[in-house]
Amino acid sequence: MSEGLFEEQIGRLREMKVITRQTADGRGSVSFRNFIIEFPISTKITAGKILAVKSLQNDYLLLEVADLLPVHYGMINLDGSIPKEIRDEVMRKVEEDWGRNDEEAWLDVYAYPIGYLLKIDGSVEFYKGYSPPIPGSTVRILSKELYENFVCDKNGVDIGNIIGEDVKLKINMEKAINYHIGIFAFTGSGKSNLTASVIRRILRENKDTKVVVFDISLEYSVLLLDQLISSNSRLISTERLPLNKVDAGRRFIRTHVIPEEISDLKDEIRKSAEDLFESNKIRQLYVPPEGSTYLTYGEIIEMVRAQINDKYTAFAQKPLFGLFLKRIDETMRQNKLTKEDIADTTLSPVIDEIESLARESGLKETASIFAFLNALRAYLTSEVQEGEEYDIEKMAIEILDSDENSPRLFVLELSNIEEARLIVGQLINQIMLRRKRSYSTNPILFVLDEAQEFIPFDTKQKDNSDFSSNAVEKLLRHGRKYHLHGLISTQRLAYLNTNVLQQLHTYFISTLPRPYDRQLIAETFGINDTLMDRTLDLEVGQWLLVSFKAALPHDVPVFFTAPNNLEELRKGIQDSRPSSPI
């Protein structure tokens, strides 16, 4: 019945252990099951392989290989208590024996359960659960076909090659976007390459999805240059626009990061930048000098509370201000508004009611409550003067435009980090407010590179990090029901808003040198520490994908090699200029 489902090599389950350690924050403990399996020394096996062992309920318990160690019988009891001459002689003979007498050596394979069982009964079925394995029983390696069936989404998007398997890794990109994505790795591991590669696949496969990239490093307009050229797009900067296409091309080359691997394409990149300018895809973003342009409900509530707490406010007016707060709360509940939402004429009936009650109570026309209500009414009913500038409101309208000819890719180049935080917060808040009022199912993905700058653990009001962090947290907490999603990329998890991290269901992980970062992910997904430590051995462009009920059909960690975005960029530029002699 199981013929063709497993590879020929078999092992034996020798030992089971439970390892307990402190959690990354030091507030508790976490335990992991570990299984030690003996395989023949000649077995071709790597970290990430999926094994199957008979369980007590007669189905196969699935294990993932975390590490392996070659063992020789001659060295089992060799320790420091044995005289050095004997140790040297034993190790010399063991060294000579390797490769000649496989019967004396084997592989100790360390694996852990991934929470799935395999049922083989006329058909193959994977299901969630755990049943203790039987010690001493046979352990099998899943065949390539069964492994691919278990790990990959058969109708998914190809994002690379699985390490150690001749299998393309296919994920459900729509679900990955829907449940938010995180990309975490140390400097130089290829975060930007993977992010750009994921974006170009979203643009290609998810035709209704729009992508907004917040770029403080000025690199994504190069990494996605062919996409900016070939699709309806916007390259947005806070800097003054060049006067002509020649100046635009020169400035682009001078100010942007051009990877060494494509340095021979500088002329083509410059010409492409000129094309962007000529096709009117480059915009200068106007940012009002006074900062936040709109009052939120939270700010109005604080103003009313300040009136109540002000010692100069007459006692006769304070109950009316208290009633005003109550009516604001009722209005927000009825309209499902939050403190971060921008205030508008929805409050006008409340203002009229409080003013009418104030007059009925006999307050004089000079009472401060009338001045406050009149000023608030004037603000809420005032018309915003429309200018020709491309501002955050116009950008939000363009991003939300569901017309098939509207721009799909927006790259915002934000070199000033404090201003960037303000723009990120305002744009996200604007789009969420407008989407609530005019619901649409067209997905919008916000990409935050160097996310630690926007959602730090320790936020401050004076540098706008508190504003941007609150906006991003709101996006990831509540955006999914409005089809608004996030992808964050950063070097350090320890420096991020933990409320944001809890909303991510799909993690791409490469080299993370600091133990805290690896332990945090291990605890989040229940992954063995040993498997997480294997990420230290990954080369540039190699990743561990971990997804909880999102990108993959089953919650299983997968090591893979991502496509080279620069090669895809080179091909895209060449295809856009077929006559170019590159």
Image (cartoon, rainbow, N blue to C red):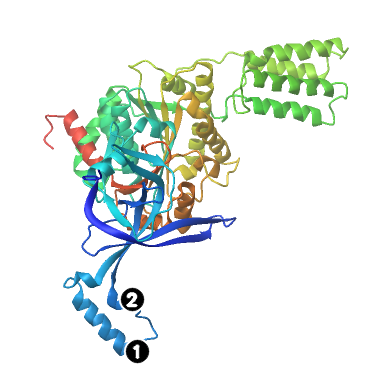
Pointer 2 local density, CA inside 10 Å: few below 14, some 14–19, many at least 20 = few
Where in the figure is residue 548, as x and y percent of width and height?
43, 40
Q: Amino acid at mark 1?
A: Pro
Q: Amino acid at mark 2?
A: Ile
Residue at x 63% of width, y 28% of height: 339
The label nearer to you, 1 versus 2, is 2
Where in the figure is residue 268, as x and y percent of width and height?
20, 35
| Quadrant where the N terminus is found in the figure | top left
Residue 144 higher or lower than 202, as above or below: below
- Distance between the Cα atoms at labels 1 and 2? 15 Å
Residue that badge 1 annotates: 83
Label 1 sits on a secondary structure element that is loop
Is 564 left or right of 240, judged from the image as shown? left
Pointer 1 local density, CA inside 10 Å: few below 14, some 14–19, many at least 20 = few
Residue that badge 2 annotates: 76
Is 515 left or right of 409, judged from the image as shown? right
Residue at x 53% of width, y 27% of height: 429
